Image: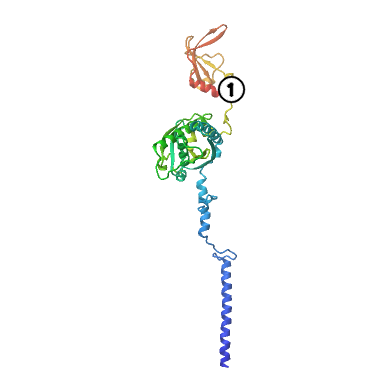
Amino acid sequence: MADAAETEAPEATEAEDASGDDLSEEWQSMVGEEGSDGQPGAAPERILNQDEIDSLLGFSMSDEDGGDKSGIRAIINSALVSYERLPMLEIVFDRLVRLMTTSLRNFTSDNVEVSLDNISSMRFGDYLNSIPLPAILSVFRAKQLDNYGLLTVDSNLIYSIVDVLLGGRRGNSAMRIEGRPYTTIERTLVQRMIEVVLQDAKSAFEPLTEVDFALERIETNPRFAAIARPANAAILVKLRVDMEDRGGRIELLLPYATLEPIRKMLLQQFMGEKFGRDNIWESHLATELWSTQMEVSAVLDEIRMPLGKVMDMKVGDTFFLDASSDSAIELKCGTVPLTRGRMGRLGYNVAVRLDAPLTSRAKKALLRKA
């Protein structure tokens, strides 16, 4: 009997443990349903992992690979103004491509094709960090706009221009020697090409406004070609120059500060578009102003007297003025004095001969009244 009791006791203990586990699981599920605030039905608190945090803030690896930008980075980059808000700029650079095609053909005596790859907007510091070296960077000044721009020539185009100008054979790619600085001859030849491009840029802007682009200096280190703050926005124009089997890229960078003086012109949808001005209406308004009728008073003299005395005036009362037949008469339009003159007679009419021209203040007042 003792053995039977001992056998039944462990079975009872196991049953109690099983029921205790079930109660514990039920209790945990109830606690989970109540949530951290003790409210039934509330969802349990969830902790974000690092990938979700990076995605929320917009610092994921897809941004570096050219993916979509969101979060804080999108807010930062939203300060950049898209070049598409300056429609006339595309027309200017299309004209530049046509001019460069002709001028570079004359410069190299070779078959040159210039094409516009793209126009983009980016920060100046990002562009300096993205320039593939070695390259030649030319800093030029826009005189009328009182600011600077940057023109970059990559190594492929440098060696191609040198090869073409020094009589290299056609059909052979330009020979590149890495790890050495550009020689004086190479820099001089490329400088001549840059001057041709800047002259074409002046001609491209000429229908819009007169701008002279003057070459300031040539650099090979991007750190010495800083013409704006790293965070400043700029417009980058990438041009492709092909000479049969040779060629390279020319990149023209213009900070928005450089284009700000002619921003209204670049906002035009087509050449000659007017903003808030109509020549026909202006001429019509001027014609109507000249034919406006104005009432002019000739004042002999003015005296001051109390209002009560004026109210007591009756027919037949007399008051004396200090003016004589030779006194100067002041001409007024309302309360605005115009000029002075002398009283006389012209035929059967009393006339006034002017002694002085209209003052500038009087002219402005007359225009306001008209």
Residue 126 horizontal/vertical position (percent): 47, 45
Residue 216 horizontal/vertical position (percent): 41, 34
* Residue 323 vs residue 350, the one in the foreground: 350
Q: Is residue 152 visible?
A: no
* Residue 180 vs residue 154, the one in the foreground: 180
Question: Pointer 1: what residue?
Answer: 283
Residue 63 horizontal/vertical position (percent): 52, 51
Q: Above or below — where is 16 with respect to 216? A: below
Secondary structure of the residue carrying numbered label 1: helix
Q: Residue furthest bottom?
A: 1
Where's the N terminus, which quadrant?
A: bottom right
**Residue located 52% across and 11% down the image:** 352
Q: Residues within 10 Å of mark 1 (few under 14, many from 20)?
A: few
In the displayed structure, does residue 182 sit left or right of residue 273? Answer: left
Residue 360 horizontal/vertical position (percent): 48, 21
**Residue located 57% across and 73% down the image:** 25
**Residue located 58% across and 75% down the image:** 23
Amino acid type at mark 1:
Ser
